[in-house]
Image (cartoon, rainbow, N blue to C red):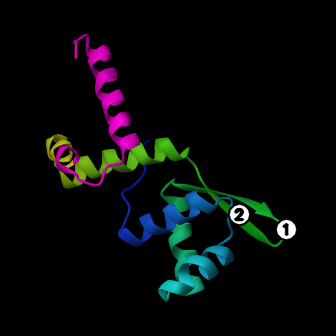
Amino acid sequence: MKPAPLGERELEVLRYVADHAPVSVRQVAEQFGQPRGLAHTTILTVMERLRHKGYLGRRKAPGAYLYSPVLPRAELARTLVRDFVEKALGGSVGPLVNYLAEAQNLSPQELADLRQIVEQMDVDTGEKP
């Protein structure tokens, strides 16, 4: 089952939780929410929405629930990119590929990773680079 799409604030909170998991609502509210002017109740609402949408899980710890992403970080990123391509680009990866081709701020490692992905795609489809 595909998780429900995310709003901008949900995505920001999800990224924060993924970077700091396992984390309590209080920790997210203090370290992420307060600097952005977000109330504890707002953070709680967003995190519970993320849990109900299937992005976060929680486990009981002494005094609080601790939240973590349900998916490993790489799989979460793939899911979010797929949703972006489907929702914003109508399912076409062409604009994304064009953006990457024109991007000036890619690191040498990111370029090497992209080359490796393209080479693997060639292998998977039986084509030669």
**How far, Cα to Cα, is label 1 from label 2?**
10 Å
| SS for dot 2 | strand
Q: Quadrant of residue 20?
A: bottom right
Mark seen at residue 14: none
Task: Return the x and y of residue 32 as percentages of the image width and height.
Answer: 56, 77
Residue 55, relative to residue 16: is it above or below?
A: above
Question: Residue at label 2?
Answer: 66
Task: Return the x and y of residue 97 as percentages of the image width and height.
Answer: 19, 42
Residue 89, relative to residue 35: is it above or below?
A: above
Residue 28, relative to residue 94: is it above or below?
A: below
Residue 103 shows up from this direction: yes
Count of labels in the image: 2
Q: What residue type is disc 1 on?
A: Pro
**Residue ID at (32%, 39%):** 111
**Residue 104 falls inside the magenta stretch:** yes
Task: Return the x and y of residue 108 as percentages of the image width and height.
Answer: 36, 42
**Which one is in front, 40 or 113?**
113
Labels 1 & 2 near each other (Cβ < 8 A): no
Please rate how many residues cluster around mark 1, counting C-alpha atoms within 10 Å: few if below 14, some from 14 to 19, many from 20.
Answer: few
Residue 2 shows up from this direction: no
**Residue 119 falls inside the magenta stretch:** yes
Please rate how many residues cluster around mark 2, counting C-alpha atoms within 10 Å: few if below 14, some from 14 to 19, many from 20.
Answer: many
**Residue ID at (32%, 16%):** 124
Which quarter of the figure is the C terminus placed in? top left
**Residue ID at (43%, 47%):** 77
Residue 104, relative to residue 48: is it above or below?
A: above
Question: Residue at label 1?
Answer: 62
Task: Return the x and y of residue 42 as percentages of the image width and height.
Answer: 52, 81
> Which region of the structure is painted magenta?
100-129
